[in-house]
Structures are given as C-alpha cells and as structure tokens.
Image (cartoon, rainbow, N blue to C red):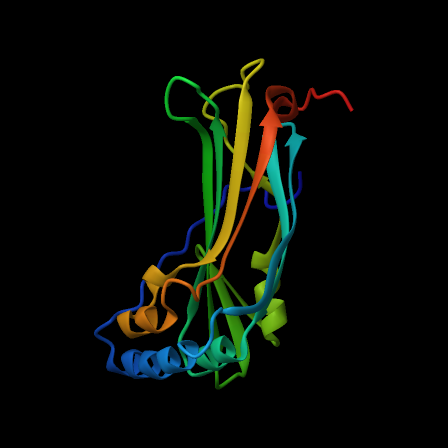
Amino acid sequence: MPVSPSPATVFSTPCSAADPVLLRRAFIAAGLLALHSGLFAQAALQELRLAQADDGPRLAYSAKLELTRSADEALHKGVPLYFVADAVLTRNRWYWRDAVVARSQRQWRVSYQPLSRQYRLSTGGLHQSFDTLAEALAPMARASGWPLDLREPPQPGASYLLRFSLRLDISQLPAPLQIGLGSGAALNLEQELNLSAEQLSGNATP
C-alpha cells in the first residue's frame, strides 16, 4: 500500500474563543454557513483499500472534495478549517464487543493567508503553502501507504472490519461557528471494508 512511510502525525491547535478578532470572523462565517446544508458542494469517497507491505498492512484512499461557496467565504474571512481522517480496524467477536486491532488518525488545518493570497496546509509540525484551494485540499483527499500498526497478528478464520472516515472537526472551531454549522452541515465521509484474516495478512488467494 502507498503513502508516507512514517507514522501519521497529529496537528491539534484549537482556536482560542477569547480572541476577539477570530470571534468576529466566526460570527460572520457562522451566518454564512448556516444558510447551507453542507460544507462540501461535492464530497465522496472514490477508493478505499488495504494492501500489504513488508512492515504490515497499509491503507489507501481517495476522495473528491469541493468546498461550498459559504465554506469558501468563511475560509477567506480568516476562519481556519480543521479536518480529521480516522482508520479503525476491529476483529469480530460474537461473545463480546469487537476487539480493536489497529487505530490511526491524521489531522489537518487549512487557512488562507490574505497578504500572500495563498492557502496554508498544516499537519503535525509540517506546513505547506499552495496557490489554489484545490491544491491545498489534495493532500488530505488521498493517501497511499498509510501504515496500520496491528496490535496482534491476524487470527486464522477471524473476520475483520475496517472503518474509515474523513470529517470536519467542529470541536476545533470557535463556539459561534460550531453553532452556525449545526449537526447536519459538517463533512463526514464514511466507508467500511470487510476483511478476512488472509486478506489482512496478504495471503489471500487471488
């Protein structure tokens, strides 16, 4: 499976609700976003698969992301947007709740820099600047080679379920913007994959 050989890093820098400038921007953005039913005009997972590497299974996904006009306006008014991708692999147990075999998360922060007219994408301690919003969204819209560290080796005959989600992290936003978004306006792409122990270990018969 493809992407970064290094473990996923997490960037988590909550906005300060005490910042009057950010609060003012959030109130404006909240009003804009409340008029729309979704943060993304078009959002869909196009691919989700698991492949084997020498050091274990790796996740690959591809999604189509396109901001609505309201979300675009909020971003350009100075409100950064936070996104989270979660991957959870569980083993089915009929006698108890499913066992979590692997769990991994990645986070991104997207902001607009008005002076340079560029978009900044931050994840972990890494920062990149892009000339267009589409270029800034691209790194979070796809991955190949995202490592999943298994807590146990695949058990013969066991059934596994991979749950993947890509969502807007509302909790990172100022309170006024959280209210403006509401429970139904946030991006939340989800998909599941049923896997056998053989598929998980890479020994499945073609």
Residue 86 image position (x, y, % from top left): 47, 46
Count the labels in the image: 0
Which residue lies most toward the bottom here? 115
Which residue lies most toward the right here? 206
Between 145 and 27, the one nearer to me in the picture:
27
Quarter containing the N terminus = top right
* Left or right of 38 on screen, residue 132: right
Q: Is residue 11 above or below residue 177?
A: above
Q: Is residue 171 above or below residue 91?
A: below
Residue 126 visible (yes or no): no
Residue at horizontal 31 percent and vertical 63 percent from the top: 14
In the rendered image, which quarter is residue 133 located in? bottom right
Quarter containing the C terminus = top right
Residue 12 image position (x, y, % from top left): 36, 57
Between 126 and 35, the one nearer to me in the picture:
35
Residue 182 visible (yes or no): yes
Residue at horizontal 51 percent and vertical 70 percent from the top: 120
* Left or right of 159 on screen, residue 177: left
Residue 79 image position (x, y, % from top left): 40, 76
In the rendered image, which quarter is residue 183 located in? bottom left
Q: Is residue 157 above or below residue 201?
A: above
Residue at horizontal 59 percent and vertical 31 percent from the top: 194
Residue 125 image position (x, y, % from top left): 44, 57
Q: Is residue 90 above or below residue 192?
A: above
Between 4 and 108, the one nearer to me in the picture:
108
Which residue lies most toward the left here? 18
* Left or right of 175 on screen, residue 39: right
